Image (spheres, grey):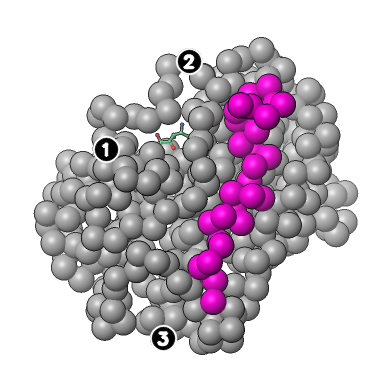
């Protein structure tokens, strides 16, 4: 059932164009500039009355929440707080009836997320679950649920669940923006048009695998990795580091580029590979991230830069480049995640690790 792949994770990485197409199917109303979710039950008045969104999640799903914050704030102009579900319910959180609380979970069963979600509901918030598993606890506990439609994810390291969460959050941001009147029909149409291109873009970016494998071979024995990204690329950096940790057992940290000078720069020496997410957008502070590349190089660190395919400037600065198709600032996280998944996969595979069943980890963390 691995369809010719050695591991489920590899298969699931390659399934992403199909998974994302399934997430989008039937939901984009291009001519109306609107989004249709068949479960949707919120009236415009209610959506307009929301004063805040709180996102609850763990692990990879928390990373998609951080990216979702950028999407919802930018398109629906609602303030979004992203909380680690494991912290939320032990700290007397502020929850009001005017808050929309979103739980994001592949399994829909994660104990911390479910517990926090129930607490938010008890305190009177309106609850929305974004899950991959139909009929899971969170979909049953919520006022409203939206499925990510990635299909079953077997590998413990989450891949297609993450990218389909990102796309679902993007659709949700467009929907909220339209209902709140912060997004015009034309602007929504533009966002939806971009979304239709994502499956093809993922197909294209998967072609970087041979290049990623070369990078994996060179750095498979590194002891530490740093991942840097700014704005919407920050959660991608966090996700790249988590993937590598989980399956290769190499220590890795994800940082917002601007934080480098405030500590992690002390770690950089000639043994330290630094993966820099540098698609060319003002929203991801391209010029500043180029500055980060120069700072790493000046200290002898090895830069692996993920860049737009036509970017000659970053190309000339980095030790290795991985080229990705140019995408809008809010979609670049989906595209840039793919080479990081492949990097983690190939490093782990070259180290002979059990990729689908990494040590100490469970697919679904149903105890606290
Ligand atoms: O099923 P969930 O999305 O609620 O799971 C949350 C985390 O346990 C999960 O994302 C975990 O971090 C993965 N192993 C990441 O690859």
Q: Is residue 365 above or below residue 257?
A: above
- Seen from the viewer's position, the closer of residues 104 and 70 is 104
Tally the marks.
3
Q: Secondary structure at mark 2?
A: loop
Q: Which residue is mark 1?
A: 112
Q: How far is disc 2 from disc 1 in space, using C-alphas?
A: 21 Å
- Seen from the viewer's position, the closer of residues 131 and 26 is 26
Q: Residue furthest front?
A: 1
Residue 302 seen in the current view: yes
Magenta region includes residue 49: no
Q: Please say if the residues under marks 2 and 1 sit with CB atoms less than 8 Å apart.
A: no
Q: Is residue 165 above or below residue 238?
A: below
Q: Residues within 10 Å of mark 3 (few under 14, many from 20)?
A: some
Q: Is residue 194 above or below residue 206?
A: below
Q: Which residue is mark 2?
A: 359
Q: Residues within 10 Å of mark 2 (few under 14, many from 20)?
A: few
Residue 187 coordinates in the image, percent (x, y): 57, 82
In the image, is 122 to the left or to the right of 135?
A: left
Compare marks 3 and 2 and give the one earlier in the sequence: 3
Q: Which residue is mark 3?
A: 181
Give the magenta part as a residue range.
1-29
In the image, is 278 to the left or to the right of 353?
A: right
Q: Please say if the residues under marks 3 and 1 sit with CB atoms less than 8 Å apart.
A: no
- Seen from the viewer's position, the closer of residues 200 and 99 is 200
Residue in view at x 22 percent, y 64 percent: 126
- Quadrant of picture, ligand 1: top left
Compare marks 3 and 1 and give the one earlier in the sequence: 1
């Amino acid at each position: 059932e691995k369809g010719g792949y050695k591991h489920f994770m590899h298969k699931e990485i390659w399934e992403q164009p199909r998974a994302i197409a399934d997430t989008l199917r039937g939901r984009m109303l291009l001519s109306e500039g609107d989004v249709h979710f068949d479960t949707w039950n919120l009236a415009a008045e209610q959506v307009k009355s929301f004063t805040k969104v709180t996102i609850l999640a763990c692990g990879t799903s928390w990373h998609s929440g951080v990216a979702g914050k950028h999407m919802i704030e930018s398109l629906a102009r609602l303030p979004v707080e992203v909380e680690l579900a494991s912290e939320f319910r032990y700290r007397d959180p502020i929850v009001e009836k005017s808050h929309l609380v979103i739980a994001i979970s592949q399994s829909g069963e994660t104990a911390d997320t479910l517990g926090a979600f129930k607490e938010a509901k008890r305190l009177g918030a309106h609850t929305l679950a974004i899950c991959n598993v139909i009929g899971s606890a969170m979909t049953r506990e919520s006022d409203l649920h939206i499925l990510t439609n990635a299909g079953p994810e077997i590998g413990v390291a989450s891949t297609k669940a993450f990218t389909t969460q990102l796309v679902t959050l993007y659709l949700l941001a467009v929907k909220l923006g339209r209902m709140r009147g912060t997004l015009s029909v034309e602007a929504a149409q533009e966002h939806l048009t971009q979304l239709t291109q994502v499956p093809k873009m993922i197909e294209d970016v998967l072609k970087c695998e041979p290049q990623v494998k070369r990078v994996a071979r060179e750095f498979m024995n590194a002891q530490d990795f740093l991942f840097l990204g700014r704005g919407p690329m920050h959660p991608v950096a966090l996700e790249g580091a988590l993937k590598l940790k989980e399956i290769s057992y190499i220590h890795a940290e994800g940082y917002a580029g601007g934080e480098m000078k405030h500590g992690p720069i002390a770690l950089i020496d000639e043994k330290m590979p630094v993966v820099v997410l540098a698609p060319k957008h003002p929203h991801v502070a391209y010029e500043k991230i180029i500055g980060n590349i120069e700072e790493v190089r000046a200290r002898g660190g090895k830069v692996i830069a993920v860049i737009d395919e036509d970017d000659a400037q970053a190309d000339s600065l980095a030790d290795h480049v991985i080229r990705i198709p140019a995408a809008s600032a809010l979609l670049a996280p989906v595209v840039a995640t793919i080479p990081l998944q492949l990097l983690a996969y190939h490093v782990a595979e070259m180290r002979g690790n059990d990729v689908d069943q990494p040590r100490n980890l469970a697919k679904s963390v149903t105890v606290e």
